[in-house]
Image: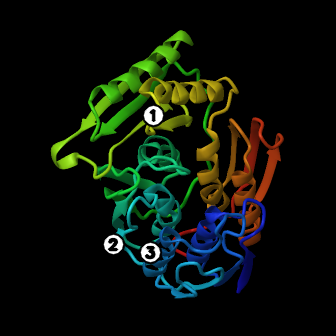
Amino acid sequence: MLEIDGSMMEGGGQLLRMATTYSAVLGEPIRVLNIRAGRKPSGLKPQHLKTLEAAAEISGADLKGGKVNSNEIEFYPRHIKGGKYKYDIGTAGSISLFLQCVIPISAFAEEPVEISIRGGTAVKWSPPVSFLSHVVWEAFREMGLECNLEIKRHGFYPKGGGEVSATIKNNTNIWCFNPPHRDIKTIRGISICGKLPAHVAERQAKSASNQLLEEGFSTDIQVESLNEKAEPYSPGSVITLWTEDMYLGADSLGEKGKPAEIVGKEAAVSLIRQIKTGAEVDLHTCDHLILPCSLARGTSDFKTSKLTLHTLTAIELAEIFTDAEFETKGTLGKTAEVTCKGIGLNKQQ
């Protein structure tokens, strides 16, 4: 059994999610201590517990210590099972972070996995589900992971209630990730609001588009005002932007008292700043790529717009669980090149 100190480095929920994913995929029992010791309060919150319970069900694992506020868990995986699953994270718990854990596990099932999830689709401290679909999972698909996502209802803080359907098909191998560097000409995006006047989403999109046009980019930003059956339970807005030819994205969340123009500008400025670094991958997508790159066949090599503590924590965990060989060229908080020689894990082994 591997023992993982949940207080190391970033010390948050990402560490717990990644450790659980590795445990399930590799069939390695784990004990995680000091869970979320870097957060106040520490321990499992309801959304972390629900993620653990889902990972346990999909991988046929025994979970010990699985209760709210627990600072220690044990996870004994057995066999990853395909099929249909349904989960309710509760209120506005992040669907994106839930999927960060369970989708890589599901990729190793012998049969396709279909998951229906209720929770928050666009909430603080996590990427919106639209960011996953248009940026992170595009990179996954490039690596041979056949995953798709459908947003049936958006969910904002505090009531959440968003509904998402995710499917992932089984295949034989994960391939290394080596995105070619291309000139970026077009920025795509989606600007959404619900239980708010339609002009909120329109103003977000216009503000972002104006900022991007000033930098010489063409734009294609969809605008959606959610109503009737698709109306969220709580008012909210979000804009997500992504590059057409690379794996770079940015987003901004609306808040009470925050003008829509600021929301749109924030996302655009963030994306422009990342594009100017010459990177192929944004800082958040980089976090998600570490685990599949460590399991992939071949050597992955890409540049990230900003090397974060989240990424370094992910690399540290990858090296604990696998024999993958990592090299980073760059310093924390700056643009960096990430290289990973993966272990070539075969799903049918």
CA distance separating discs 2 and 1: 38 Å
Q: Quadrant of the N terminus?
A: bottom right
Q: Nearer the viewer, residue 258 or 261?
A: 258
Residue 154 placement (x, y as % from top left): 32, 49
Q: Are marks 2 and 1 in contact (CB under 8 Å)?
A: no
Residue 147 placement (x, y as % from top left): 41, 55
Task: Give the residue type that dot 1 points to.
Answer: Gly
Q: Nearer the viewer, residue 224 or 179?
A: 224
Q: Quadrant of the C terminus?
A: bottom right
Residue on which the image places disc 1: 257
CA distance separating discs 1 and 3: 37 Å
Q: Are marks 3 and 2 in contact (CB under 8 Å)?
A: yes
CA distance separating discs 3 and 2: 9 Å
Quarter of the image holding residue 19? bottom right
The reply, left or right, for residue 270 in relation to residue 46 is right
Q: Secondary structure at mark 1?
A: loop
Residue 113 placement (x, y as % from top left): 36, 67
The reply, left or right, for residue 301 in relation to residue 243 is right
Quarter of the image holding residue 191? top left
Residue on which the image places disc 3: 54
Task: Give the residue type that dot 3 points to.
Answer: Ala
Please tell me the numbered disc located at residue 42.
none
The chosen color scheme is rainbow
Residue on which the image places disc 2: 85
Task: Give the residue type that dot 2 points to.
Answer: Tyr
